[in-house]
Image (cartoon, grey):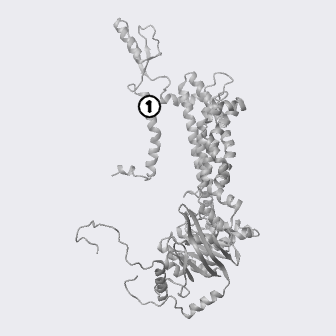
Amino acid sequence: MARTRYFIIWKELDHGRRRVLQVFSFIIPLLLWSIISYCPLVWHPMVIVSDPGDIAHFKVDSMIKKEAFYRENAKAVEQHRKPAQGVPANPVYLPAPHEVAASFYKAFVTPPRLPDEPWLHQSLWHSITVILWGFLISSVVAVPLGILCGTYRFFAYLTEPFVEFFRYLPAPAFAALAVAVLGIYDGPKVAIIVIGTFFQQVLMIANTTQRLDPALLEAAQTLGARGIKLFSRVVIPGILPDVYRDMRILLGWAWTYLIVAEVVGNSTGITWFINQQAKYRIYDNVYAAIIMIGIIGLTTDLALAWIGSQLFTWKSKKKSVLSRLSAAYAASSRVKPKLSQEAP
Amino acid sequence: MTTHDVTLPSYLEQTPDVRARFRSISERPVVLRVNNLGKTFDSVKGAVQALKQVSFEVHRREFVSIIGPSGCGKSTLIRILAGLEELSAGEILLDDREVNGPGPERGMVFQGYTLFPWLTVLKNVMFGLEVSATSNGITGNTKEQEARDWIKMVGLTDFADSYPHELSGGMKQRVAIARALANRPRILLMDEPFGALDAQTRAKMQSYLLQIWKNVDVTIIFITHDLDEAIYLSDRIVVLKANPGEIQEIIEVPVEHPRSPEQFLSQEFLATKKRLEELIHPPREAEEMLPIIRMTQIGDDVY
């Protein structure tokens, strides 16, 4: 009986179960990774030599393909030489979880190899600024335009066909052009993110605006609102929470353009860091950097979601922290008048 | 079509009090005059006549209901009156001036509440006062005080700072009524306002509405498909028929004021209801039979 309660269509699970499953969504991939990394019987296609024996071209700590290792050993035994010893290992590009975990710290404290290269935190910050500039420039134009398109058919017909066409052009295709026009520094990178975000943004915001309940507009009209007041007092506040949600999604998409954008012109930011570490074959740092992008993205989104729930309390049943505080304050100051009311 | 034959008086018979009341109503100025109103829709099958030659007058502080079978265009009619849809023929005069488009002098209460979810009850009620051009001279404080008075009138003083999602359906509709009335409309249009409410809440709302109407200088046009509701609330009932929507009859409700739920069983009430039934569900020769084959055991009968 208890089993069936997990699998009911549309049925929300209780708080505890939900939490457990959410934690498991991270534990499962981590577990798979750990199995591959820590169980010598699973995969491990390489061998690290611990004692080369009499095999001349084996050295301590060198990594050799399993087949080659056993072949050479078999040959050695045949020729009555001492065979080599080794432990199974994964290729260098798949470090174990604990190594990646360690490099989370290591990567930040390791100074760059060349004096003029940036530290990891500088690379990360550079990436974040590129994203934010790209997203900001796109939003400043796309949000008002999208709202206009969603509100007035005039703007919708005037812009949407072209936008629909343009959004199929892959942003990276403009890389060469962006470099030619904007130089090799941050200009073209920001431009790629703008191109990647802008057109989706216009369509998404326009769509959201159109989904406003038309009955609210009618009600406002029968109350005497028209023209700009209808727009500023009904359309804008009505769509704000949904526009906010769209922006969260779009910010996530902007991150996906980052890696492409950062190799345009001179490579910078987290992409430069990843490529550089891969070049030095420090793959634990590569994984750490990739995971860091995920962590930054997820925490930003969670933070924005929380801020949204505080801003748009009328959407949720919950009260915002601010309003709860003010209610508590009001309640504490209301105690006395209540007594005096009862007195007469 | 009752199986018990009860002899009821004619719905046209009026007691002297009722007759005097109708005479005094007809002496009041006409607030709304609808002349030969027509509405045609363009559909894929060609033009469809939704309303044809609709003419009636509503006097000051009168309560007029519009009823009719589904598809008779009663919602279209009230939406045209509110200015939310355009008419194809005829004219609408409010205080002898032709009206065009929506305006605050014709308040509207919708079936779907349509409260602004991002505004508190107080702000919802203040909305009309804040946006309408006529109230520019009023200061913010006066507006708030006025809004609070309206909220008090519908009995929601404690909920002034609540958001719509925290209210029940009946409470939401009371806010919607207060919001419409705060604009001091000449006429209040109500489009099946209690249609989404359960029977108990609906009865309560009807009595609230009668109290509000008694105490506020407002003329009400009320759309409903509930015959009891129409009789209970109205002075007159405009009965529409479908395809095309035309006026069948305008009935003067012979039930005395003040109204109370006990009157549901009075002779005048039942006589009026009988007449409405005849108009809206005309007697048919035989009941339509579904082509159902018997799927139960012999002897296993429900009646």
Above or below — where is B294 with respect to A161? below
Residue A102 shows in the view: yes
**In this view of the protein, which residue sits in the foreground, A83 or A161?**
A161
Q: Is residue A321 above or below residue B112?
A: above
Rendered residue at 24%/70% (across/down): B300
Q: Which residue is mark 1?
A: A34
Name the spot of residue A273 as percent of width and height, x first: 61, 28
Where residue B142 appears, as percent x and y from the top left, is: 72, 71
Crowd class of label 1 (few under 14; some 14 to 19; many from 20; radius 10 Å): some
Q: Amino acid at mark 1?
A: Ser
Q: Which quarter of the picture shows residue B6?
A: bottom left
The spot of residue B157 in percent (x, y) is: 61, 71
- Where on the picture, by quarter, is residue B99? bottom right
Secondary structure beneath dot 1 equals helix
Farthest residue in the left direction? B298
Identify which residue, A122 or A254, lies in the foreground: A254
Residue at the location (65% across, 60% down)?
A234
The residue closer to the viewer here, A48 or B239, is: B239
Q: Pinpoint the chain carrying mark 1.
A: A
